[in-house]
Structure formats: structure tokens, C-alpha cells
Amino acid sequence: FKNFQFPYYKEAIDLCKIASARCKGHYIGWDVAIAQQGPVLIEANLAPTPQLFQAINQLPNGLGRLETLENALKVNLRP
């Protein structure tokens, strides 16, 4: 990813700031997609996490969708 420039980076940040100003939450994580026309808000999370995989305790395997994600990306994400 050396020298990679994230498309619409400033626009994505600006969009999140505008959306945040309309919300009462003090800490919100935004899921943003980059479309051909620019950034699009997907959802707001009141309890965001920096982890790539989420809800690990909501599935019986205790790993959430980690295995599915690893298989799709063909990488090992476990320490």
C-alpha cells in the first residue's frame, strides 16, 4: 500500500463530520463505502470496534465470522 492514496478521503471525513453533528452520541463509528461518485454512509455504530471481525460472542463458535472472513481473504487474521 506504499504511496496509495485513499480516494475521496477528505470528502469521506467531511461526510462523517456532517453526520456526527446531527447525532447526539459522543462516540460514533461510521461505516463508509467509497462509490464511483464519492463516499456513502453505510451505518453508524454507537459501540464501534477497531477489530476487523465483530460480534465474536454472538455465534456459538466464539469466533464470530472470522473463519468466513479468513477464507474469503485467503489470509490468517489470528495472532
Image: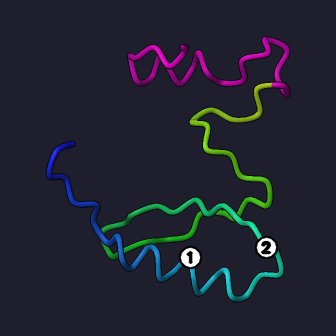
Q: In the picture, residue 56 is in which quadrant?
A: top right
Quadrant for the C terminus, please. Answer: top right
Task: Report which residue position mark 1 lands on.
Answer: 16
Which one is nearer the viewer's eye here, 9 or 68? Answer: 9
Question: Which residue is at 59% across, 63% downward?
Answer: 42
Task: Report which residue position mark 2 lands on.
Answer: 26
Kind of residue indicated by mark 1: Cys
Q: Residue furthest left?
A: 3
Question: Which residue is at 33% across, 76% downward?
Answer: 37
**First reached walking from the N terminus: tag 2 or tag 1:** 1
Q: In the picture, residue 31 is in which quadrant?
A: bottom right
- List x then y, in percent, for residue 1: 21, 42
63 horizontally vs 76: left or right: right
Residue stretch rendered in magenta on the structure: 57-79
Q: In the picture, residue 46 is in which quadrant?
A: bottom right
Kind of residue indicated by mark 2: His
- List x then y, in percent, for residue 3: 14, 52
The image shows residue 60, relative to residue 2, as above or below, that is: above
Q: Would you call the spot at circle 1 few (<14 residues within 10 Å), some (14-19), or many (20 or more)? A: many
Query: Is 61 included in the stretch rendered in magenta?
Result: yes
